[in-house]
Image: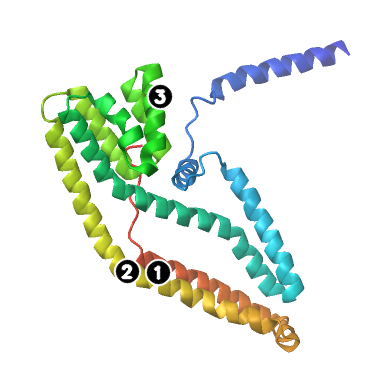
Amino acid sequence: MMPLGAGILFGTGLFLVWNAFWWQPAAERKPSNFALKTQDILTQAGLTGVSFRQVVIVAAGTSIFCGLLTFFLVPVPALILVVTVTAAYMPWLAIRGRARRQQKALTKTWPEVIEHLSSGVRAGLSLPEAIAQLATRGPEPLRPPFREFAADYRVSGNFSGSLDRLKIRVADPVADRVIEALRLAHDVGGSDLTRLLRNLTQFLHDDLRTRGEIAARQSWTIAGSRLAVAAPWAILIVLSTRAETAQAYATPLGSTLILAGAGISVVAYRVMVHVGRLPTEGRVLR
C-alpha cells in the first residue's frame, strides 16, 4: 500500500507542477469574441442580470413546449421538427430585436447628451461633474448608467476607470466613441473641449440623418422578407390540421418536401435580410 500511496502523491505533485505553468487565473483569462458579443446583446436589450446559459434554458423550454403542441395538433414528424428547431431560436431572435430597437433609441439620445455636457462645461463645471449631472438632467434612458458612473467616481475618484465601467454598462459603439473622446479631452486638457463637443454633436447628427434616410428606404425589404417566409408556413400548419393533408405530409416524400422548404426559407430569409439591413457598427473601442 505504501508504494501505491507514494506513487499517487508523486503523480499528483507532478500534475500540479505541470498545471501551474499552463493554468491562468480567472481574472487574466480573456473572454472569447462570442462571449463578448453575446454579453453586449444582452446588455443592449436591458437584460444585464441574465446569462447566456439562462437564455439557452428558456430556448430549450420554448422548443419543447412548441414541439409538443405541434405534435398534438399536427402529427407530421417533419413539421414537428421544423417547429421545434424554429422555436428554439425564437427567444434569442426576440432578444436581438429588442437590443436593436433599444440601441437605435439610445443612439438618437447621444447628441442631446453631448449638448448637456457642452452646457455644463461652459457653465464652469469640470468634465467629471458635467458627466455626473447627466444622472438627473440627461435623457431618461441613459440616466441609470450615468447615475452609476457618478456613484463610482465619488467612491474611487478614478475618472478613466469609471469611464471604462460606463462603457461596459452601456455597451454601445456610439457610446464608445463619445467616451473615448471625453477621456482624451480630460487627459489632454486645453481650451478646445467645447469645440470638440460641438464637432462631435454635428458628426452624430449627420450620421443619424444619413442612416435614418437609408433605413426608411430599405425597411420594406425586411418586412417583405418576413412576410414571405412566415405566410407559407402558417398556411401549411393550418392545412396540416386536416387528416388527409397530415397523412400526405407524413410520407417520406412529404417530409423531404417540408425539410427542403425549410432550408430554402432559411437561406432566402438570410439573404434578403443581409441585403435590406444596414451593417451594424462594431465595438472597436471597447
Q: Which quadrant would the N terminus be assigned to in this image?
A: top right
Residue on which the image places disc 1: 222
Q: Which quadrant would the C terminus be assigned to in this image?
A: top left
| Residue 244, visible in the rendered structure | yes
In 3D space, how far apart are the residues under numbered discs 1 and 3 (Cα atoms)?
42 Å
Q: Residue at x 60, y 64 (%)?
A: 86
Q: Position of residue 231 (x, y in %)?
A: 53, 78
Left or right of 90: which side holds 219? left
Give the mark, 2 or 3, whose residue is nearer the N terminus.
3
Q: Residue at x 18, y 47 (%)?
A: 203
Q: Please say if the residues under marks 2 and 3 sit with CB atoms less than 8 Å apart.
A: no
Residue 120 vs 270, above or below: the answer is above
Q: Position of residue 88 (x, y in %)?
A: 62, 59
- Indicate the amino acid at tag 3: Ala
Residue on which the image places disc 3: 151
The quadrant in which residue 142 appears is top left
Q: Residues within 10 Å of mark 1 (few under 14, many from 20)?
A: some
Q: Which mark is residue 282?
A: none
In the rendered image, the residue lying farthest to the right is 1
**Residue situated in front as seen by the camera: 10 or 97:** 97
In 3D space, how far apart are the residues under numbered discs 2 and 1 (Cα atoms)?
7 Å
- Indicate the amino acid at tag 2: Gln
Q: Residue at x 22, y 23 (%)?
A: 126
Q: Residues within 10 Å of mark 3 (few under 14, many from 20)?
A: some
Give the mark, 1 or 3, whose residue is nearer the N terminus.
3
Q: Secondary structure at mark 1?
A: helix
- Indicate the amino acid at tag 1: Ile
Q: Residues within 10 Å of mark 2 (few under 14, many from 20)?
A: some
